[in-house]
Image (spheres, rainbow, N blue to C red):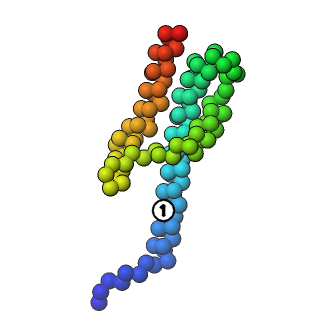
Amino acid sequence: MGKSSEVSVGQSFFIVIGAYLTIAAFLALGMCIALYYAWAFTYIWEWFVVPIFHLPKVTTLQLYGLVLMSALFNLKLIDYKDDREVKWPNTIIGWLLGPLFVLLIGYIAKSMM
């Protein structure tokens, strides 16, 4: 007798639960990355926007909303090479080091003002 390719009800349940947990994990990761960008944006805002335009300081959560809104205009978060293959190491390094690089450049510019 050969193996059956049918999936049992129990296996289907765990597949569906696994899919939902994977989606939830990616959403949580995205929210954390956006909050990280908002944290960096908070310093850039205080260093440049407040003194130049005389606008009030804003909280990290307010800037979190702006980061999410700006993500609607720039949805290319994944770095693709030929044949649409994802270069994950470059993408993850960009996500993690991008805000720190912006903060470094902003700090240097602020110190020259």
- Residue at 56 percent across and 36 percent down: it is 35
Image check: 9 left or right of 58?
A: left
Residue at numbered disc 1: 18
Rendering coords of residue 33 (x, y %): 51, 39
Quadrant in which residue 65 is drawn:
top right
Residue 16 located left or right of residue 86: right
Mark 1 surroundings: few (<14), some (14-19) or many (≥20) residues within 10 A: few
Q: Nearer the viewer, residue 60 or 48?
A: 48
41 lies above or below 85: above
Q: Quadrant of the N terminus?
A: bottom left
Residue ID at (54%, 50%): 27
Provide residue 50's location: percent of width, then percent of height.
64, 19
Outermost residue toward the left in this view: 1
- Which residue is drawn at the image coordinates 45% and 21% (left, top)? 104
Q: Position of residue 12 (x, y in %)?
A: 48, 73
For the image, the number of numbered tags is 1
- In front: 51, or 99? 51
x, y percentage for residue 20?
Answer: 53, 60
- Along the viewing direction, whichever of 14 and 35 lies nearer the viewer: 35
Q: What amino acid is found at the position of numbered circle 1 in the picture? A: Gly
